[in-house]
Image (cartoon, rainbow, N blue to C red):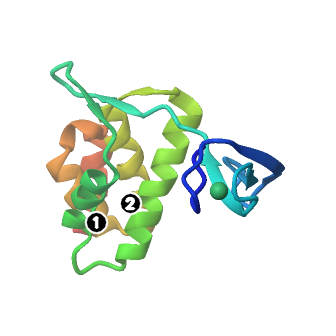
């Protein structure tokens, strides 16, 4: 790695330490030219999560897109932006743990619907109406009856 002070290429690692985040490693480096030290943070490159759409196309998992989809359903409910973001994070973590790198979009919708259902029925109904295919139709009818 190039020295940030003198631009020479020969820097040595003098210390390696894991940082608070387990996927990040902190390294102290010393330049062989000017002897100055600096710190680098190395991050493990995660494999991207790929979403398989209904038409079979693959698309990179997009947090913001999922968040927007959720926010459309949560307007004027008790689900705040923070909660919606938390749902996205939980969904992403769950998918990475269970499915590795490929996941069907329907499954993502089903997980989100399930989480919304536990927090706010109105948001759940709205989400499920838009993405009806994600939920069990009979169960969905019961839910509507329950809040009607
Ligand atoms: Zn240097």
**In the image, is the residue at mark 2 within 8 Å of ligand 1 by its beta carbon?**
no
Q: Which residue is mark 1?
A: 123
Residue in view at x 44 percent, y 67 percent:
119
Using the image, tell me which numbered label, if any, was put on residue 33: none
In this view of the protein, which residue sits in the foreground, 57 or 13? 13
**Measured along the vertical axis of the image, is residue 81 above or below residue 29?**
below
**Measured along the vertical axis of the image, is residue 57 above or below residue 39?**
above
Q: Secondary structure at mark 2?
A: helix
Q: Quadrant of the C terminus?
A: bottom left
Residue in view at x 23 percent, y 81 percent:
76
Residue 40: quadrant of the picture: bottom right
First in sequence, mark 2 or 1: give its number: 2
Residue in view at x 60 percent, y 42 percent:
9
Using the image, tell me which numbered label, if any, was put on residue 116: 2
Residue in view at x 42 percent, y 50 percent:
114
Give percent across and percent down for residue 94.
Answer: 54, 42
Residue 123: quadrant of the picture: bottom left
CA distance separating discs 2 and 1: 6 Å
In this view of the protein, which residue sits in the foreground, 69 or 57? 57
Give percent across and percent down for residue 129.
Answer: 17, 51
Give percent across and percent down for residue 27.
Answer: 74, 52
Q: Residue furthest front?
A: 33
Residue 41: quadrant of the picture: bottom right
Q: Quadrant of the N terminus?
A: top right
Q: Residue furthest top?
A: 56
User: Crowding at label 2, few (<14), some or many (≥20) Cα neighbours within 10 Å?
Assistant: many
For the residues bearing labels 2 and 1, Cβ distance under 8 angstroms: yes
């Amino acid at each position: 790695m190039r020295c940030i002070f003198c631009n020479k290429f020969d820097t040595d690692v003098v210390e390696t330490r894991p940082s608070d985040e387990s996927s990040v490693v902190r390294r102290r480096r010393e330049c062989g030219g000017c002897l100055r030290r600096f710190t680098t943070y190395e991050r493990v490159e995660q494999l991207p999560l790929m979403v398989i759409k209904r038409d079979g196309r693959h698309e990179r998992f997009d947090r913001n897109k999922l968040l927007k989809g959720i926010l459309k359903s949560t307007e004027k409910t008790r689900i705040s932006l923070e909660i919606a973001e938390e749902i996205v994070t939980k969904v992403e973590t769950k998918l990475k743990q269970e499915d590795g790198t490929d996941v069907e979009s329907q499954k993502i919708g089903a997980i989100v619907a399930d989480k919304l259902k536990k927090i706010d029925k109105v948001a759940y109904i709205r989400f499920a109406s838009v993405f009806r295919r994600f939920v069990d139709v009979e169960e969905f009818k019961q839910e509507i009856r329950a809040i009607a």
